[in-house]
Image (cartoon, rainbow, N blue to C red):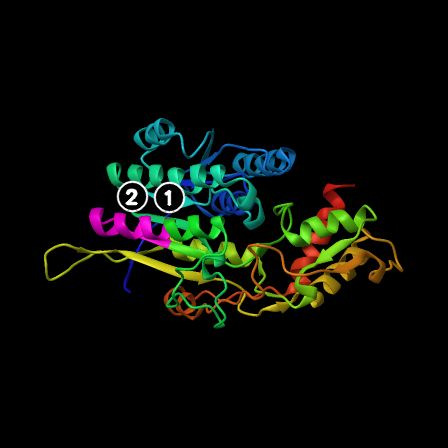
Amino acid sequence: MGKTPVELNGKTILVTGSPGFIGAYLVIRLLKELESGTVISLDNMNDYYEVSLKEWRLQQIEKSAADSNVNHVFIRGNLADKALIEKTFSEYRPAVVVNLAAQAGVRNSIDHPDIYIESNIIGFYDLLEACRHWPVEHLVYASSSSVYGGNKKVPFSTEDKVDNPVSLYAATKKSDELLAHSYCKLYNIPATGLRFFTVYGPAGRPDMFYYSATKKLSGGGKIQIFNYGNCKRDFTYIDDILEGIVKVMRGAPEKKTGEDGLPIPPYAVYNIGGGRPENLLDFVSTLQEELVRAGVLPEGYDFEAHRELVGMQPGDVPVTYADSEALERDYGFTPKISIREGLRKFAEWYKDYYK
């Protein structure tokens, strides 16, 4: 699909889900790299995980804003608050929107479905409606590798059928893709969905395995390794993810008219992943080694005594593996950061943050 270049300098850019993990780093990068314009962060700062970490990320954003030529505005509110979203769009008229706000977590969606419908369905609908009434140059939104469900064909391709989700979280993300496609067709809104594959790094989400495992190990606890270690994950370091997002922001799907005189949907979906699935046991070993190196765990730490191999858990899948060829072809994006390099940066941050 052809791309229409999108200039980011001098524009108003809305990033929802900041100061969440990916959102915070994206805002900081934009504040450092752009020469002019306005970046708006929007988040409800909910307590799905420790709010203090979100507040720390917001402080890092504010530090970057103080040294930037770009204006930064933080709006505390809920994406499902339609009046707030309409007010934000009518007042600031964002040219580019990056929707990273979502209720995340596969397992949590099993016990708390309501918040997933509110945030991931109603909230995303509100955003699409705003993009309809206050047209944008490009809407980029977060989907998830979870949409592939129990797909046994690897690597996962965006050409694969994804109609059999194994968690409510995955179902909401697939629903977002369908909603986006219909709005692109009906209202000619250029939109790109990104299916993220296990993003990790410093100041990440504490519910993610590498982070929660670190907390347990540093407290002397035991970690559970699911499917008896027979899992593979396409881990993607945060800096690689940011590189991909920014490249995508700068190229919107081209608007075209079909033979019927109606818009051909300016719509695209890409995988954004490391492209090198890692065995979970190897990943855990590397994590433990880097935690010792950073001083989070003591020398001679007894790894085996703090591991427990258990069966698969509901809603989870044994393998995630991204076919990112389309993203490489259309945007020149190739992940570069190895697991050891990424986990080393996380371990060093963890040591400093929790000291």
Residue found at x 29% / y 53%: 181
**Number of marks in the rendered image:** 2
Image quarter where the C terminus lies is top right
- Residue range highlighted in magenta: 176-192
Identity of the residue furthest to the right in this view: 300
Residue 134 position in % (x across, y down): 26, 37
Q: Quadrant of residue 225?
A: bottom right
Under tag 1, what secondary structure?
A: strand
In the displayed structure, does residue 291 sit left or right of residue 244?
A: right
Residue under numbered circle 1: 97
Q: Which residue is drawn at 55% across and 34% down?
A: 62
**Residue that lies at the very extreme toward the left in this rendered image:** 260
Q: Name the residue nearer the viewer: 119 or 30.
A: 119
Q: Nearer the viewer, residue 11 or 330?
A: 330
Dot 2 corresponds to which residue? Answer: 136
Residue 37 shows up from this direction? no
**Label 2: element kind:** loop
Q: Where is residue 295 in the image (x, y as percent from the top left)?
A: 82, 52
Q: x, y (%) of residue 267?
A: 30, 56
Specify whether residue 183 is painted magenta.
yes
Is residue 66 or residue 149 the one in the foreground?
149
- Image quadrant occupied by the N terminus: bottom left
Is the residue marked by circle 1 packed among few (<14), some (14-19), or many (20+) residues within 10 Å? many
Residue type of the residue flagged with mark 2: Val
